[in-house]
Image (cartoon, rainbow, N blue to C red):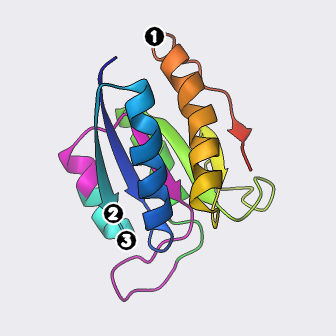
């Protein structure tokens, strides 16, 4: 077991995701930190300051606090994250299907948005079970949990 750095990039349903992370992470890792970014600009800044093992990433974010919502701006962070930290597990949190997001960079895993805390906890449990087993091989497959 090791310490885990987790970043939630979400402007709306972050409380549910935070609760799920704090419920699930202790079962897999001795320690964890969980940071939150609510805008694209905040996410970019946070990613420059710290390396994360797992990122829960919404595809739709405001550019800035009161800014516009450019299409799939959250997922536009994926290529640079993977370039700098290829072993980071990116969990996409979106209400859209992968086919609806065609053309956007795709996350390693998917967790639908607008889940209850219990549903988010169950989905995250499945993902972290696999992640904990694969941390030595970094063999992530793309899957969706609902």
Residue marked by disc 1: 136
Give the overall secondary structure of the magenta segment. loop
Q: Position of residue 46 (x, y in %)?
A: 25, 55
Residue 82 lies in what quarter of the image?
top left
Question: Is residue 78 highlighted in magenta?
Answer: no
On-image quarter of the N terminus: top left
**Label 2 – label 1 distance at C-alpha:** 28 Å
Residue where numbered disc 2 is placed: 37
Mark in front: 1 vs 3: 1
Q: Which residue lies at the image location 72% right of the left edge and 44% below the top edge?
A: 145
Q: Residue furthest top?
A: 136
Label 2: how many Cα within 10 Å (few below 14, some 14–19, many 20+): many
Cα separation, mark 1 vs mark 3, equals 32 Å
Secondary structure type for disc 1: loop
Residue that appears at 40% across and 76% down: 63
Tell me the number on the disc at residue 98. Answer: none
Q: Above or below — where is 5 with respect to 21?
A: above
Answer left or right for 12 relative to 40. right
Residue drawn at the location 62% of the way across and 62% of the way down: 116
Residue segment shown in magenta:
46-69
């Amino acid at each position: 077991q090791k310490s885990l750095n987790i970043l939630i990039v979400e402007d709306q349903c972050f409380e549910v995701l935070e609760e799920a992370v704090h419920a699930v992470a202790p079962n897999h890792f001795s320690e964890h930190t969980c940071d939150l970014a609510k805008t694209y600009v905040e996410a970019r800044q946070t990613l420059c300051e710290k390396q994360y093992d797992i990122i829960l990433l919404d595809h739709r974010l405001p550019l800035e606090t009161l800014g516009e919502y450019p299409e799939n701006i959250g997922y536009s962070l994926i290529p640079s994250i993977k370039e700098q930290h290829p072993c980071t597990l990116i969990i996409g949190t979106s209400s859209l299907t992968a086919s609806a997001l065609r053309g956007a960079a795709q996350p390693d895993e998917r967790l639908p948005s607008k889940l209850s805390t219990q549903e988010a906890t169950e989905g995250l449990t499945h993902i972290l079970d696999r992640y904990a087993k694969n941390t030595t091989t970094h063999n992530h497959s793309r899957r969706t949990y609902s």
